[in-house]
Image (tube, grey):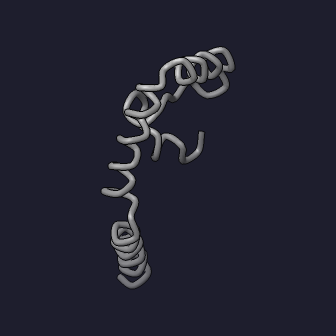
Amino acid sequence: TGGVPDVVRDGVTGLLPPVGDAEAFAAAVRALLDDHEKRRCFGEAARRIAAAEHDLTNAMEVLDTVVRRAARKGNP
């Protein structure tokens, strides 16, 4: 919940069972425990996406955009 779906992409970098569904969560954990190759692929995809979208330069650009928008709204 919260920001997890912003980072974990279901079926690409991990599994996102429905919020509050303990059985689905347990099934997802079992599936990952039983499949080393899937865990490896998810990890590699997560590493690529994090490097491309969540590095310091990208974070600075996003923050700069947000601050500039807020400043424009405060100074019409």
| Number of numbered tags placed on the structure image | 0
Which residue is depicted at the point 40% across and 59% down? 54
Which residue is depicted at the point 40% across and 27% down? 11
Residue 42: x percent and y percent? 41, 35
Answer with the quarter of the image where residue 27 lies: top right
Q: Quadrant of the C terminus?
A: bottom left
Q: Residue furthest bottom?
A: 75
- Residue 23 in the figure: left or right of residue 67: right
Residue 6: x percent and y percent? 46, 46
Q: Is residue 49 above or below residue 15?
A: below
Answer with the quarter of the image where residue 30 lies: top right
Which residue is depicted at the point 36% across and 78% down? 68
Q: Is residue 52 above or below residue 73?
A: above
Q: Residue furthest front?
A: 36
Residue 51: x percent and y percent? 35, 57
Q: Is residue 76 above or below residue 43?
A: below
Which residue is depicted at the point 61% across and 28% down? 19
- Residue 33 in the figure: left or right of residue 46: right
Along the viewing direction, whichever of 20 and 50 lies nearer the viewer = 50
Q: Is residue 1 above or below residue 30?
A: below
Residue 39: x percent and y percent? 46, 31
Q: Quadrant of the N terminus?
A: top right
